[in-house]
Image (tube, rainbow, N blue to C red):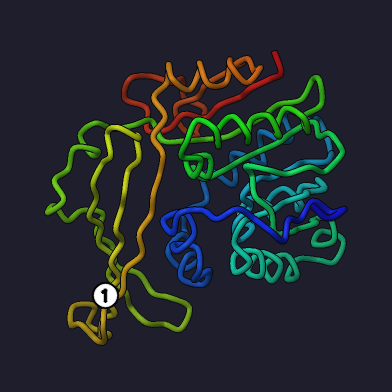
């Protein structure tokens, strides 16, 4: 591990944890209109910290949340497993005013194993990234690292899905999640999803197929391509126990990014955790 926390010998992870993030431009094109979580993390950081402070961001991706935090005056240390996502993040931050972009320090790292020799009042892990911890050992290792880097009165803030049995039970033949959007080159793409659920390991395997389209948004125009995504599902009571075992108290669990209370029908679990 180098002095800035980067790890050139990162352990291998399943392709379903990395392949969807190899094309950072496609990722940004698909999620360009998804902003509710970034705004939530910015507002929550302001409420929790009371002013500019240092924030550690695990799995910072292309910097959607990072950008919001540095624009609010925070200094962000962020890392991600994907070099392509980090290059995209740095490009996004370089377009900000110099005083804002310089407040972000990014490096390649692994949330299962990191050591920065410093503590932060706020550590975040946004956009279901915690779901790329697939085994109990990986979860425990990540949480141990988080606790080691969290100030004694700090908050670990992250979000995961609230598992939906209906979706997890889809047959592999069912096509769902259809949407059409433009990529950065102006090309139209139709995305559709198929999935299967590994009940033993609680892993949702999602195959995302992209079909290029002509300008009429209907006619196929080129060969389709596919990415596979693996997401560990965390059920509420199980998540509480995993956090408790790692030495955390759940101070608050919200059901979405609009500050609604968590309920049986909530789409998300937004977790506010403190050292026990």
Mark 1 burial class by Cα count in 10 Å: few <14, some 14-19, many 20+: some
What is the x, y in percent for residue 133? 51, 40
Give the answer, above or below, for where 21 lies relative to 172: below
Give the answer, above or below, for where 165 lies relative to 74: above
13 vs 27, nearest the viewer: 13
What is the x, y in percent for residue 177? 26, 54
161 vs 243, nearest the viewer: 243
Q: Quadrant of residue 217?
A: bottom left
69 vs 204, nearest the viewer: 204
Q: Residue at x 49, y 59 (%)?
A: 18
Q: Residue at x 84, y 54 (%)?
A: 4
What is the x, y in percent for residue 39? 60, 44
- Mark 1 lies on a secondary structure that is strand
Give the answer, above or below, for where 74 lies relative to 271: below
Give the answer, above or below, for where 53 lies relative to 136: below
Q: Residue at x 65, y 64 (%)?
A: 86
Q: Quadrant of residue 107?
A: bottom right
Q: Residue at x 69, y 13 (%)?
A: 276
User: Badge 1 is on which residue?
Assistant: 211
| Left or right position of 266 against 274 | left
| Left or right position of 76 against 30 | right
């Amino acid at each position: 591990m180098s002095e800035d926390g980067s790890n050139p010998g990162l352990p291998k992870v399943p392709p379903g944890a990395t392949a969807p993030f190899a094309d950072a431009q496609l990722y940004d094109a698909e999620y360009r209109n998804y902003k509710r979580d970034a705004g939530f993390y910015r507002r929550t950081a302001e409420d929790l910290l009371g002013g500019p402070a240092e924030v550690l961001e695990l799995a910072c991706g292309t910097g959607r949340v990072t950008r919001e935090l540095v624009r609010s005056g925070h200094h962000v240390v962020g890392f991600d497993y994907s070099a392509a996502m980090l290059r995209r993040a740095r490009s996004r931050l370089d377009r900000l005013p110099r005083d804002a972009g310089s407040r972000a320090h990014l490096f390649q790292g692994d949330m299962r194993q990191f050591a920065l020799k410093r503590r932060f009042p706020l550590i975040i892990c946004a956009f279901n990234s915690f779901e790329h911890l697939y085994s109990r050992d990986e979860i425990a290792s990540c949480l141990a690292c988080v606790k080691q880097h969290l100030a004694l009165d700090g908050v670990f803030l992250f979000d995961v899905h609230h598992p939906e049995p209906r979706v997890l039970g889809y047959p592999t033949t069912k096509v769902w999640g259809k949407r059409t959007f433009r990529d950065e080159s102006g090309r139209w793409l139709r995305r559709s999803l198929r999935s299967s659920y590994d009940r033993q390991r609680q892993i949702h395997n999602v195959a995302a197929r992209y079909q290029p389209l002509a300008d009429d948004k209907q006619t196929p125009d080129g060969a389709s391509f596919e990415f596979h995504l693996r997401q560990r599902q965390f059920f509420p009571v199980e998540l509480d126990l995993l956090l408790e075992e790692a030495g955390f108290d759940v101070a608050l669990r919200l059901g979405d990014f609009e500050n609604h209370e968590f309920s049986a029908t909530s789409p998300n679990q937004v977790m506010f955790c403190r050292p026990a």
